[in-house]
Image (cartoon, rainbow, N blue to C red):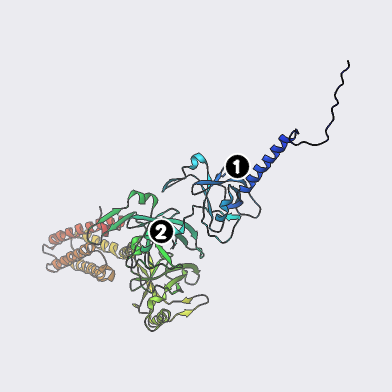
């Protein structure tokens, strides 16, 4: 019995369900779907240009918004023609796109140690990251931004004010601002001004203290040590330790009108100390600054840039620039001094300040170098009518109008002392003492001719009278005055004694006694002069 083997027919139809390709196909579909989901939800890519990279690492550093990571740094590179480095950031979600407008501000957060404390401590664990501030409502979507060099501060939390400082002394970014010893803000930016001679200091003050800032407010650097002797008592106040370590800026406020606002273009001057800030000012709120030129052959070695220009004791301007040149004819240094004067000080109800100022010069107003420091003789420019050099007028030069000057100059105490000592050294003291010593030496010999001795004494008296009648003698200290007058009196007494006796009397003994007193006085005079030469200031402070 035979068995028939069944025939197997090969199917030519493709069966998806039973095909071996079903698994890869499903995997491909899933991968495609996941890829679509990833790219559909992936946020945009932006570029941020920073001045320099400060610890950012591609593939590791993140970007945070309100302390929540919203993206990661994918690349960092330098591009030709770009100042700085370009940091490429991929955001996690497209929901961040409405924030990528001109409102977005980016800066790098890193650990910093300063006088204000330690900031960015969280970066010690998580690493340096990019922080961003933004808000919805921008006009245009952007893909490229300029990073900030320091943290951004929302202007809704306060207001920025513009201060101008001549040298920025004791001021740096982060310096706190105080009002009534309460910290109300800090210095945010310091930049070189357009005139290249001053600094623009931008400060930020919190909203709740902004109403206390008025256009008449004064800003000054906090004094480290304040000495007050105005009431007869010596008061010395030393600033707290935090002021000494980190400095500070204070400002004044009347507080009368809290609703008044400071103009956008208003600039406050940053004074060096409170005393300078509280000095009286005159003139209009809108300054009318005009530059004048002063030409002088007087020494300006003690005149400094920004030294005040004063009228009737009020500051009305300052020294802007100084140039020196050698005068080969007079063998002196001639000086050109440029001063800025606020002519609004001279304004009245009928004429503007500049015209009144020009008229005042024609009526005798002159510039004068004066000393306001009695010890060192530091100089300032004084506008005064007190002179005897006649009237003049302002002459328009090539670049500036020339303001006429008084040729005399006020001097300080030390300069006057030097001149006094010069006059003292020029006095015939040595000649006088020599004459007295000759008289003393002659007294030890027999008196052969009393008339000759009387003639010598008369000559000595005449020399002393010539000395004491000089104008310079009147300027000597009282001590030296008394000594010289004592010598004069002694010599006159000797002359009287001699005239009262003849050559056969006891005049020799009496004259010898008188001259002994004169010798002792002469010796004391020599000791005094040695002390004066050794320590000139002993005339004021003594020989201690």
Residue 59's disc number: 1
Q: Nearer the viewer, residue 518 or 215?
A: 215
Image-based side of 537 in relation to 136, left or right? left
Element under disc 1? loop
Q: Count neighbours of disc 1 (C-alpha within 10 A) and say few if under 14, some if 14 to 19, many if 20 or more.
A: few
In the rendered image, which quarter is residue 528 located in? bottom left
Considering depth in this image, is 76 or 387 the residue closer to the camera? 76
Q: Where residue 119 appears, x then y in whole percent? A: 45, 46
Residue 205: numbered disc = 2
Q: Secondary structure at mark 2?
A: strand
Rendered location of residue 505, percent (x, y): 11, 64
Q: Which mark is residue 73?
A: none
Answer above or below: position of 507 versus 76. below
Mark-to-mark CA distance, 1 and 2:
38 Å
Q: Nearer the viewer, residue 256 or 81?
A: 256
Say if 203 sits above or below 496 in the image.
above
Q: Is residue 220 at least partly visible in the picture?
A: no
Q: Position of residue 521 (x, y in %)?
A: 20, 59
Q: Residue at x 50, y 77 (%)?
A: 397
Left or right, 192 with respect to 373, comes to right
Around disc 2, counting alpha carbons within 10 Å, would you say few (fewer than 14), some (14 to 19), or many (20 or more)? many
- Which residue is the extreme one toward the top? 1
First-in-chain label (1 vs 2): 1
Which residue corresponds to the image point at 29% horizontal and 54% vertical from the top-left? 237
Residue under the point 88% across and 17% down: 2
- The reply to whether the C-beta atoms of the residues labelled 1 and 2 are less than 8 Å apart is no
Quadrant housing the N terminus: top right
Residue 195 is left or right of residue 485, and the answer is right
Residue shown at 25% from the left, 71% from the top: 469
Return the x and y of residue 241 as percentages of the image width and height: 34, 48
* Residue 397 can be seen in this image: yes
């Amino acid at each position: 019995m035979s068995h028939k083997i069944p025939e197997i027919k090969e199917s030519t139809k493709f069966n998806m369900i039973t095909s071996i390709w079903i698994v890869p196909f499903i995997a491909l579909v899933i991968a495609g779907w996941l890829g679509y989901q990833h790219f559909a939800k992936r946020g945009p890519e932006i570029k941020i240009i920073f001045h320099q990279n400060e610890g950012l690492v591609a593939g590791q550093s993140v970007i945070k918004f309100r302390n929540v990571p919203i993206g990661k740094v994918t690349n960092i590179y330098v591009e030709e023609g770009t100042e700085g480095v370009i940091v490429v950031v991929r955001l996690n979600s497209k929901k961040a796109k409405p924030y990528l407008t001109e409102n977005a501000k980016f800066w790098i957060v890193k650990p910093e140690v300063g006088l204000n404390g330690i900031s960015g401590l969280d970066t010690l664990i998580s690493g340096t990251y990019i922080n961003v501030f933004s808000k919805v409502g921008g006009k245009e979507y952007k893909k490229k931004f300029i990073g900030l060099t320091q943290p951004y501060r929302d202007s809704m939390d306060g207001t920025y004010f513009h201060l101008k400082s001549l040298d920025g002394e004791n001021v740096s970014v982060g310096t706190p601002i105080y009002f009534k010893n309460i910290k109300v803000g800090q210095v945010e930016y310091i930049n070189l001004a357009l005139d290249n001679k001053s600094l623009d200091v931008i400060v930020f003050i919190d909203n709740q203290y902004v109403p206390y800032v008025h256009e008449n407010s004064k800003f000054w650097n906090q004094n480290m040590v304040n000495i007050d002797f105005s009431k007869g008592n010596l008061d010395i106040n030393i600033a707290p330790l935090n002021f000494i370590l980190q400095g500070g800026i204070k400002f004044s406020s009347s507080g009368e009108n809290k609703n008044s606002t400071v103009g956008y273009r208003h600039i406050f001057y940053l004074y060096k100390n409170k005393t300078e800030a509280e000095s009286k000012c005159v003139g209009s709120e809108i300054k009318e600054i005009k530059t004048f030129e002063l030409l002088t052959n007087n020494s300006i070695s003690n005149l400094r840039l920004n030294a005040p220009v004063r009228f009737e004791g009020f500051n009305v301007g300052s020294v802007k620039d100084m140039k020196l040149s050698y005068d080969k004819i007079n063998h002196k240094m001639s000086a050109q001094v440029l001063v800025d004067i606020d002519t609004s000080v001279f304004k009245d109800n009928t004429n503007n300040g500049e015209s009144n100022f020009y008229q005042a010069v024609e009526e005798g107003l002159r510039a004068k170098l004066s000393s306001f420091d009695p010890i060192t003789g530091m100089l300032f420019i004084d506008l005064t009518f007190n002179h005897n050099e006649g009237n003049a007028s302002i002459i328009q030069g090539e670049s500036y109008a020339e303001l006429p000057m008084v040729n005399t100059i006020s001097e300080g105490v030390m300069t006057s002392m030097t001149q006094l000592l010069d006059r003292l050294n020029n006095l015939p003291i040595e000649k006088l003492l020599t004459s007295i010593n000759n008289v003393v030496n002659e007294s030890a010999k027999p008196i052969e001719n009393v008339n000759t001795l009387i003639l010598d004494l008369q000559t000595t008296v005449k020399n002393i009278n010539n000395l004491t009648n000089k104008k310079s003698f009147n300027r000597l200290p009282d001590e030296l005055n008394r000594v010289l007058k004592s010598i004069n009196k002694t010599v006159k007494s000797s002359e009287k004694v001699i005239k009262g006796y003849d050559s056969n009397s006891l005049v020799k003994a009496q004259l010898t006694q008188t001259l002994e007193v004169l010798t002792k006085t002469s010796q004391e005079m020599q000791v005094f002069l040695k002390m004066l030469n050794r320590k000139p200031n002993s005339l004021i402070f003594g020989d201690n």
